[in-house]
Image (tube, helix red, strand yellow):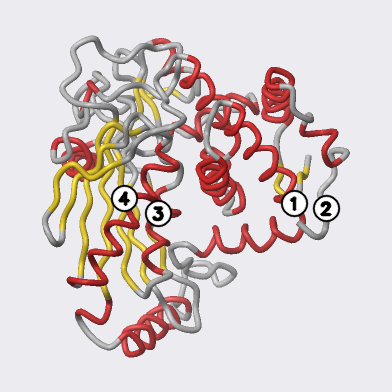
Amino acid sequence: MLISPSTLRTFTENIFKAIGCSHEHAVLAADVLLKSDLRGIDSHGVARLSGYVRLWEKKRINPTPNIRIVHETPTTATVDGDAGLGLVVAPFAMEVAIKKAELYGSGWVSVRNSNHFGIAGYHALMAVEKDMIGFAMTNASPLVAPTFSNERLLGTNPMCYAFPAGKYPPVIVDMATSAAANGKLEIAQRLGKQVPEGWIQDKEGNYTTDPHALKTGGSLLPLGSDRDHGSHKGFGLSATVDILSAVLSGANYGPWAPPFVAFLDPPNDPVGAGIGHFLGAMRVDGFRPVDEFKDHLDNWVERFKSSSTVDPSQKVIIPGEPELEAEADRIANGIPLVDAVVEDLNKLAERFNISPLLKTAAGLAQRNP
């Protein structure tokens, strides 16, 4: 089913307002989720809306947080999110990083006491808009087993690097440090499909293609899947995210990170507050003139796009290119939602007495979102 971006945006804003968010925060939170759906990252868009509501019901999300800087130097800061929506806390922190970069060349902000912040790319792109290089990463619910382990100790721990180009779109490296993001398992579950081998192991440490394996004690695998294919590198990247996001900020790290799902309670022996993020911004002109950098990044893109390929019908894909293509298509034609997500959203509408998603647009995409 195709839903127009404007319809989905209004619906999402209304849900956030219904749980007590201010107009400003509701608009921002909806924008982060919509950006994910527009860019084709369906696992982190409105499909997660009910998850935020359930955390609010458990009083694990504060809809009216006092987001504040609790430690600061000219180029660094630590932000306490006051248990607010990560969708709101992370942009606040990135704004702090950008302001510091404007003054001193770079800005780095660690965040504690936050929640799931959506796609990392949203926050990193805020710096790109200022001709800066953006960094965004976060730790997450412990679902990933380190190399050789069958114990869930790390999150999917995504990291994103975004670089401004000239005539081409930004180069955006946005990825989980696990073999697959948990959201992809959720999509497979909704569609009734198996997942590729190498994404998950069961509780005994054997490969499985069952997307429900996490519910029976299994775990996601690090990027690389096993030692022979470089899983120790994925483990190292995930560890880096966990340390910068949580150990540095005072958030919960490793197995103490609170779960995103509301039916699981956080550990009763926390080592910090909430989950953590790490965001940064660097001015390009701190290294060379912006126009020169953009010209050479354009040249970089062109050279890689023109490279020979094993299959002549395929071309090298620049990081961020598939998401950009999805965004252009979905702005024009609407955002596809599977029936299970539509049903879930309409249950939220019924609960909060707002217009159901289907009735707001007769279930059809509008050509002028």
Task: Say which of marks 2 and 4 sits in front.
Answer: 4
Q: Nearer the viewer, mark 3 or mark 1?
A: 3
Tell me the residue that label 4 is attached to. Answer: 93
To which residue does mark 1 refer?
Answer: 334
Would you say the residues marked 3 and 4 are in contact, meaning their CB atoms lie under 8 Å apart?
yes
Nearest the eye: 42 or 64:
64
Q: Dot 1: within a 10 Å radius of its alpha carbon, few (fewer than 14), some, or many (20 or more) residues?
A: many
Secondary structure at badge 4 equals helix
Q: Which residue is mark 3?
A: 123
Which one is earlier in the sequence, the residue at label 1 or at label 4?
Answer: 4
Mark 2 vs 4, N-terminal side: 4
In what element is the residue under mark 1? loop
The residue carrying mark 2 is 366
Q: Position of residue 1 (x, y in %)?
A: 78, 39
Q: CA distance from mark 3 to mark 4?
A: 9 Å
Asked if the residues shown at circle 1 and circle 4 are in contact, with their CB atoms under 8 angstroms apart, the answer is: no
Between the C-alphas of marks 3 and 1, the distance is: 23 Å
Residue that extends furthest to the left in the rendered view of this protein = 73
Please state which amino acid type lies under the numbered disc 1: Gly
